[in-house]
Amino acid sequence: MKKVMVIAGGDWQIELIKKAKQMGNYVICSNLYEDSPAFPYADACEVADVLDKERNLEIAKKYMPDAVISDQSDIAVPTVAYLNEKLGLRGIGTERADIFTDKSVMRKFCKENGIIVPDFKLCKSVSDAQEMLDKYHKIIIKPIDSQSSRGVFTVTDTKQLVEHCGETIAYSNRRNEFLAEEYVDGAEFTIDGVVVNKRHYPLCISVKEMYEQNPNVSRMQTYTYSHRVYDYELLRQTNKNLIEKTGLPFGLTHSEYKFCNGKYYLIEAGARGGGSNLSAKIVPFMSGIDNYYFLINQALGNPVDESILTNLQLPKEKCVIMRFFDFGEGKVQSVHGRDVLENHSNMLDFQLNVQVGDELKNPKYGRLRPGHFIIGGEDFEDLKKQAENILEKVYVTFEK
């Protein structure tokens, strides 16, 4: 029996741990909290901050795993790469991990390799970012290495820049720096895939709809093989070009783009699967590919059948709607409709993170959204009606 160490133990690592165990492996999981959601699914659990590389290395040396992996967590990627290097295991390398987790490094890499990105500037202060604001009048400021849209703000004047700059810097883990970049208008997309032997295979694409209260946080993502307006084949080729130029040897990928003036602008690219169980639930449904099979086996150095991917014909009829709840603000008096989520025939996954007495606020970043559901089918128009029906029946009432 081989040992697999999973760094991070939140909700989104549960399916990865379950898959690793299903494949016959002994699983060690490390995370910051003793009551971490993924801990009950692992064989051994250790308390450690995901960002603490040396503490996680101590744990790894205690168990001597055959592979160290993670998914759906940007902040875990550098730690995973570091442990694999120190233990002589198969990983993506710390330099490549920096490309995928330090936004300033990724932007510079793209500029050097002909990948289209918004104009940007690495900043340490308000005055550094003011130049970009004066130039474009509307900019995005973001931490260099956070996740779930923490510390990301759209800024249109100096007052907003001053108001948000401190919070943005606070979410940068590596250095007290942040990015100020040109605001690119247009539709936003996600694309997820898998890499085998440095070859990238795209598996599913979504177009985003953002919260009205916060245009930097996704409220809905709709997945289809193609789109009547946007060229998804161009997006597949654009992202394949990016990923293969980085030299990523294996693993999952999640990238986000905006479409403007006939071009796809890279917004983010991660060497991990998309969060909210995108990689665990949506990718397999949309593509028919067990992407965790490829991730775990490649990390262990086991042979994989790449012909499954080289001969892959993505199912054109499959569609998915991932919808995050938008209940509003107030103190929760009652929660309605959980049974609708539990009993829906096309439900792939859901979370309803609301209890009586909770004080709900409009989400400042992704992890503060009150829950979501994922439904899948083969008739997109019908699926949209199902989503609307769920939203009518799942709601909260607030105290007056």
Image (tube, rainbow, N blue to C red):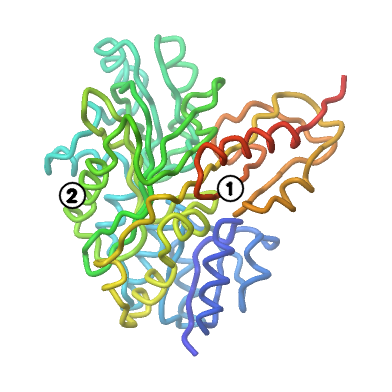
Residue 171 percent across, percent down from the top left: 47, 37
Residue 149 percent across, percent down from the top left: 47, 36
Residue 156 percent across, percent down from the top left: 40, 12
Above or below, comparing residue 354 to residue 136 in the picture: below
Residue 212 percent across, percent down from the top left: 54, 21
Nearer to the camera, 307 or 327: 307
Residue at 34% across, 42% down: 226
Q: Quadrant of the C terminus?
A: top right
- Residue type marked 1: Ile
- Residue type marked 2: Asn
Residue at 59% across, 57% down: 10
Nearer to the camera, 197 or 131: 197
Does residue 78 appear to the left or right of 52 in the view shown? Answer: left
Does residue 144 appear to the left or right of 377 in the view shown? Answer: left
> Which residue lies most toward the bottom here?
1
If you read the primary sequence from the N terminus, does the residue marked by circle 1 or circle 2 appear first?
2
Q: Which residue is mark 2?
A: 241
Q: Which residue is mark 1?
A: 375
Can you tell which quarter of the image residue 386 is in? top right
Above or below, comparing residue 142 to residue 349 in the picture: above
Whole-Å distance between the Cαs marked 1 and 2? 31 Å
Does residue 207 appear to the left or right of 349 in the view shown? Answer: left
Can you tell which quarter of the image residue 30 is in? bottom right
Q: Which dot marks residue 111?
A: none
